[in-house]
Amino acid sequence: MKEQTENIQQKRLAALYEVSSQLGSSLDLSEVLNQVMDAIIKLTDAERGYIVLYDEVTGDLNTAVARNVAQEKIEGQSMQVSRTVIERSVATGKGIVTNNAQEDNRFANQTSVVGFRLRSIMCAPLRVRDRILGAVYVDNKFFSSVFDTDDLDLLITFTNQAAIAIQNARLFTRTDQALNRHLGEITLFQRIDQQLNKHLDLDRVLRLALDWAISLTKAESGSIGLFEETEEEHDRVLRLLVLTDEETAAVRPVIPADHPILSRVLAEEKSIVIVDVTPEQSIDGTPAASQLVVPIRQEGEIIGLITLESQQSVSLEDDIPFLERLADRASVAINNSRLYERIQAANKAKSDFISVVTHELRLPMTSIRGYADLMHSGMAGPLNEQQQQFVEVIRRNLKRMSDLVRDLGDINRIESGRMKFESKSFGIRETVEEVADNLKEAIAGRNQTLSVEISQALPHVFADPTRISQVLTNLLSNANKYTPDDGHILIKVSEETDFMLVSVIDDGLGISEADQEKLFTQFFRAESSQVREQQGWGLGLSIVKKMVEAQGGEIEFESAIGEGSRFTFTIPLAKA
């Protein structure tokens, strides 16, 4: 259960990073709103969604975009939402989730909830720094308990990032005069966004942000630090992670919370400028003529500081708006970097665990196999018929365990990048014939027929022949297991541009549309009794996909219940 929860969390974080990295790719307000809305519906599995924004002139909350799961615009009678939920969210600045608004005491008596028969609802404010632009609202009118608190946390994290993209687009679409004034800065920030979000290494992100800050302001030096929790309860320190002085940066100084300037920023929660800075007032301990300190925020909380300094008698006041907007961008990039670090740490922990487990399992399995073989051969004394059957059960299940350990090891090595592929140029015909010959007995045992269609004059492919044999063996073994007796299996090989296409086609059970979406998921097996009666762990297709893609190929399939399946994978040609 814990591993399943971690896998779900990893998928959520990966999905969040994927959609977050696409933000900032456009400055057209309509396109950004549609992009944000479609991304939120995808993240939350909602039926439909709405973005409402404050009108900058009248101050009214108006619907800016309404979309459904099919990425279609919602109009007319379908524009049915709970204004109460939206208004409460923007008024409190907090997210709201209800599993069934019809039975929720907060909303059950509202006309919109009753009249429109609303059930599962989530809403989160769109916030840029301390300003709320509006809100994001998603719901499902037909089902209860669609959303939970984890979904709300995911929605809030994304809306905090999306609000910046929406604000950028709104800035870009203002009046011609305002557009001319801000166009250069917005274009610049788009470049900054692209650079910051292109990197996932935290130190690299912070270094880029500091370089931009110094190059585009009157400052000559600076630093960026992030807060860390200390062992003492409710106490934090600021660790300077990047500084202008590279030699000092290696030390990564720690600034206590009672530092005079640090404590002032935390108390006032805004940017400050200090002149005639003493070493005691300076964040990095060096005196300066002027110092600008700007907080970096995430979800309303200060997580770090950007500090700029100048030794010249110049005012850094004018740089505050630019640096605050840069801090917003840096905050998004920092969050993405931390998400990536968490995913990497989780993957490493999983990889280490599997490595230990597979290693520890092999030792007792070797002993069990040895003694079972001794008893089976009669070297430990004669066995009666029932004892012989017991030994056969042990050997059969030992082989299943051995296959599981091998598959887990293969997945672990592929995901951690430790699997070696000895790629070379070779003819695919020999591999196909060898695999077909190895499975001839199993196929004949079910009275199935196996055909091979392969041209005489095919070019060589470039891959690891052992791994390609493993892929083909797995697919052919699946076809054998899930094709009824007297069925037919076909291996078809053909050339296409820079790739060789290898297909395994059967007229077996087929795969339902619901199961097709999960087919390459680790440990997934269909609930069908005909599938469950066949031995397996649900790892084979996951390994196949990873092995094919690791060698520069792709895999796809076609299937229908009762009509069989066709799995096709590609192998790069040697000439390509």
Image (cartoon, helix red, strand yellow):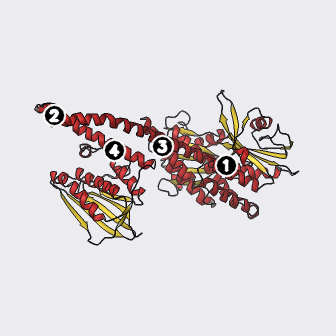
Instruction: Determine the CA span between mark 1 and mark 3.
Output: 24 Å
Q: Is residue 419 visible?
A: yes
- Determine crowd level at label 1: few under 14, some 14-19, many 20+ residues with C-alpha closer than 10 A: many
Closer to the eye: label 2 or 3: 2
Tell me how far mark 1 sits from mark 2, CA to CA: 69 Å
Residue underneath mark 1: 206
Tell me the quarter of the picture where residue 90 sits.
top right
Question: CA separation, marks 4 and 2?
Answer: 29 Å
Callout 2–callout 3 Cβ contact below 8 Å: no
First-in-chain label (4 vs 2): 2
Dot 2 falls on a residue whose secondary structure is loop
Residue 286 in the image, given as x and y percentages of width and height: 81, 42
- The residue at which mark 4 appears reads as 406
Tags 4 and 2 touching, CB below 8 Å: no
- Vertical position of residue 31 compared to residue 141: above or below: below
Residue at left offset 29%, top offset 65%: 493
Is disc 3 placed on a helix, strand or loop?
helix
Q: Are marks 1 and 4 in contact (CB under 8 Å)?
A: no
Q: What residue is shown with label 3?
A: 347
Q: Say what amino acid the circle numbered 4 marks.
A: Arg
Of marks 1 and 4, the one in the foreground: 4
| Left or right of 242 on screen, residue 63 | left
Query: What is the quadrant of the N terminus in the image?
Result: top left
The amino acid on which the numbered mark 2 sits, given as a three-letter code, is Met
- Viewer-proximal residue, 81 or 169? 169
Left or right of 468? Residue 9 is right
